[in-house]
Image (cartoon, helix red, strand yellow):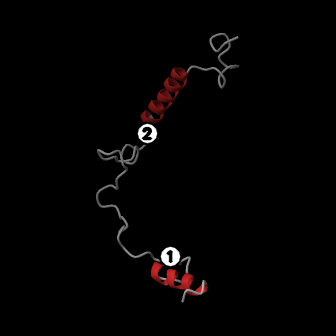
Amino acid sequence: MSYSDDPDGHRYCCRPHENSEAEWSNLLAERRARGELNPEVWPPVVNGDSFEVAAVGSPVGDPSAEPAIPARTMSRWTTWSEHDDHLRSAAGAG
């Protein structure tokens, strides 16, 4: 048997991709016609590089600002030079 012989029984295993896409498009069109998809909010605003962009006037963060909670360092040394000095002294090369 195939999808064309038994569409309900083969809905998730061998349904053609085109049928799924057409059904989803129809569902979206019906929802849009009922006003369920707000055209002012969805789809998101996208610029020419296909990145989502904030709407004019909406609050945005400052990417160059200091973090609200400073990141903890994983090391007790603040520079590579201090780290190297520690390694030399631990190896006895003082």
Tell which of 73 and 47 is nearer to you.
73
Residue type (three-letter) at the residue carrying disc 2: Gly
Residue 66 in sight in this render = yes
> What residue is disc 1 on?
71
Q: Which residue is drawn at 65% across and 22% down?
A: 11
**What whole-number distance in Å separates the C-alpha atoms at marks 2 and 1?**
45 Å
Q: Residue 80 carries which label?
A: none
Q: What element carries label 1?
A: loop
Indicate whether 75 appears above or below 43: below
Using the image as rendered, state which of residue 88 and residue 12 is in the foreground: 88
Question: Percent x, y for residue 43?
Answer: 40, 43
- In the picture, the quarter occupied by the C terminus is bottom right
Give the answer, above or below, for where 77 lies relative to 24: below
Q: Mark 2 points at which residue?
A: 35
> With respect to residue 41, does 6 lie above or below?
above
Which residue is found at the position 53% from the left and 78% from the top? 72
**Whether residue 76 is visible:** no
- Identify the residue at horizontal 66%, vertical 23% (top origin): 13
- Helix, strand or loop at label 2? It is loop
* Name of the residue lying farthest toward the front: 93
The percent coordinates of residue 17 (x first, y second) are 54, 23
| Quadrant containing the N terminus in the rendered view | top right
Residue 48 in the image: state x and y as whole percent: 29, 44
Precedes in sequence: disc 2 or disc 1: 2
The image position of residue 27, as x and y in percent, is 50, 30
Q: Residues within 10 Å of mark 1 (few under 14, many from 20)?
A: few
Q: Which dot, 2 or 1, sits closer to the camera?
A: 1
Q: Is residue 20 left or right of residue 29?
A: right
11 w.r.t. 41: above or below: above
Q: Is residue 3 left or right of residue 55?
A: right
Lateral position of residue 13 relative to residue 26, left or right: right
